Image (cartoon, rainbow, N blue to C red):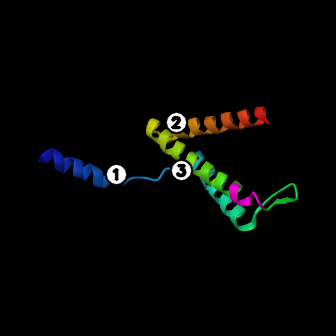
Amino acid sequence: MAEQNDLQRKNDTNPVKFRISPLNFATAFFFILAGYIFIYGAKFTGIAYDRLSGTIGWIFLLFGLVVSFLDIIFRNFFPETKKLWIVELSFITLVLIIFFLVK
């Protein structure tokens, strides 16, 4: 019983903190971009893609969901915020390098 009270007091004094990470920003970017494309349509280099705007919006929405899921996975593996930032920034850098190499 005493152990249970100690655990309760410990949980009361340490509220859960919301940790911001780089993949949170990427998720927000993809969701905002998907919403923008759904509202205004997709336009690249001045050419409007009327037929593909919905598909492109859904693709960015899917990207946002996948990045959000990756953020949850990384948070489980790296509980320290500093290590989490280093790993997620490294992951974003690796993805950008691969993107530019393929392009």
Kindly report the distance in space between the C-alpha atoms of the residues bearing marks 2 and 1. 21 Å
Residue 52: say if magenta: yes
Q: Residue at x 69, y 55 (%)?
A: 55
In which quadrant is the C terminus drawn?
top right
Query: The disc labelled 3 sits on which kind of residue?
Result: Ile
Dot label at residue 20: 3
| Residue at the disc numbered 1 | 14
Q: How many marks?
A: 3
Vertical arrangement, residue 95 with respect to residue 69, above or below = above
Q: Nearer the viewer, residue 87 or 8?
A: 87
Question: Callout 3 environment at 10 Å: few (<14), some (14 to 19), or many (20+)?
Answer: few
Q: Is residue 81 left or right of residue 63?
A: left
Kindly report the distance in space between the C-alpha atoms of the residues bearing marks 3 and 1. 18 Å
Query: The disc labelled 2 sits on which kind of residue?
Result: Lys
Question: Callout 1 environment at 10 Å: few (<14), some (14 to 19), or many (20+)?
Answer: few
Choose the circle earlier in sequence order: 3 or 2.
3
| Chain part drawn in magenta | 51-55
The nearer-to-camera label among 2 and 1 is: 2
Residue 21 appears in the figure: no
| Residue at the disc numbered 2 | 83
